[in-house]
Amino acid sequence: MRLVFATVFEYPHPGGLSTHVDMLSAALLRRGHEVSFATPRRISPVRLELVARAPSVLLQALGGDRGRIWSHRERLRILTQGLARLPKDQIVIAEDVLAAIAAKRAGLPCLLTVHGYLTREALSRRGMLEGSLGQRYFERMEREGYLAAGRIVTVDHRLKEHVLTVSGRGDARVQPNFIDTAWALGLPPRDDSRTALGLGQVPVILCPRRLTPKNGVHVAVAAMAYLPHAVLLVVGDGAESDSLQSQAAGLDLGDRVRFEGAKPHAGMAQYYAAADAVVVPSVPVAGVEEATSISVLEGMASGRPVVASAIGGLRELITPGENGLLVPPDDPRALAHAVREALSDAGPALGRAAQDYVARHHSADAAAEAFEDDLSAL
């Protein structure tokens, strides 16, 4: 099959969506399919900057959500026109609802992968107000996107229910996130990684998270007040960077919390290798809950005990006490207590069970085979 991954957003970019596309596209290539990528920047970078970005900044400065609406409309137009130029034997794998709309308008069959909640996430991280013009626009686009797709795949069961609620479609298939399990087997040696990162033999806790409110990095920072002999490595960037660094300074945590910034996916192997435990302390924000997190899967596949919040798709990955630990969200004391358990003699057994679980249930090659069935049906 001739497949094109499409999104109105940037690709590649830091975050789970890009990692998902990287792994799925590579697995589909291994299975003999042709794969290409379509984004507004790849189609028309000049138009993206001059027609989509620049006016949206000016409009947003005037108040309301007109800038956001303008940007999304123009991205949709650019992507639609780009897809319309493709041969009609192409099948679109849409990575957001606007890409599904673009595929339908371009006359191409489409499978939509639902990674999150378009409207809820806009409300949670972009300053959009409840009942605003922007919310109404996003809700309309979200429903249209679900109805435009020939097939829908969601990455957890909560998202499947969301699709049903928004669009009335109950035919979405749940395909939890997945990883390249061979990647985890090729991690560098632990001691070499620690030396390269300037770490001694203190317990190392890894928090591989973008610095956004729903990712709950503030909970991990607060928990370090109860873990005086450990070091926290925060790998990621985002709008919360300044406030999180101020939080760490206010708690007088010194160099026990290190903000490493964003790293390319290939560079993350060193951090997982150096870690003794991985934390994913996500919190609900504006109805948005973490899906089947790729960070959790990578931590598990690396053989590290993972401590995560008991919300959303995270509960679909971790069986507490068997292959990881779950804690109430936004509870630094509970997180610290669970991390101490992960760093104890119980940690290695949790890590081994987690690694085995991911190998059996979340490999990219198995996921590609399931996607292949959906794509063939189109």
Image (cartoon, helix red, strand yellow):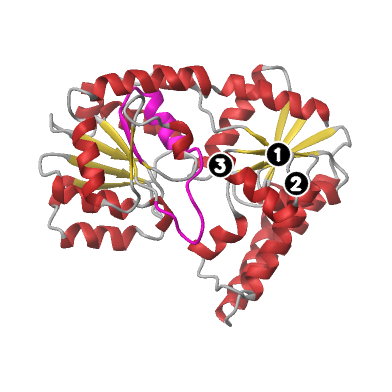
- Label 1–label 2 contact, CB within 8 A: yes
What SS does tag 1 mark?
A: loop
Q: Quadrant of residue 296?
A: top left
Position in image of residue 86 (x %, y %): 84, 40
Q: Quadrant of the C terminus?
A: top right
Q: In this rendering, does residue 278 appear at all?
A: yes
Q: Nearer the viewer, residue 329 or 302?
A: 329
Position in image of residue 234 (x %, y %): 30, 45
Position in image of residue 276 (x %, y %): 24, 29
- Few, some or many C-alpha atoms within 10 Å of disc 3 (few <14, some 14-19, many ≥20)? many
Q: CA distance from mark 1 to mark 3?
A: 19 Å
**Disc 2 residue type (three-letter):** Arg
Q: Residue drawn at (34%, 24%), measured in percent from left and top?
A: 322
- Label 1–label 3 contact, CB within 8 A: no
Q: Which residues are magenta?
A: 283-308
Q: Residue drawn at (56%, 35%), measured in percent from left and top?
A: 20
Q: Nearer the viewer, residue 164 or 89?
A: 164
Q: CA distance from mark 3 to mark 2?
A: 23 Å
- Front position among marks 1 and 3: 1
Residue denoted by label 2: 169
What SS does tag 2 mark?
A: loop
Residue denoted by label 1: 172
* For marks 1 and 3 on the same chain, the one whose residue lies earlier in the sequence: 3
Residue denoted by label 3: 17
- Few, some or many C-alpha atoms within 10 Å of disc 1 (few <14, some 14-19, many ≥20)? many
**Disc 1 residue type (three-letter):** Ala
Q: Quadrant of the N terminus?
A: top right
- Front position among marks 3 and 2: 2
- Number of callouts: 3
Q: CA distance from mark 1 to mark 2?
A: 7 Å
* Residue 218 located within the stretch drawn in magenta: no
Q: Nearer the viewer, residue 297 or 232?
A: 297
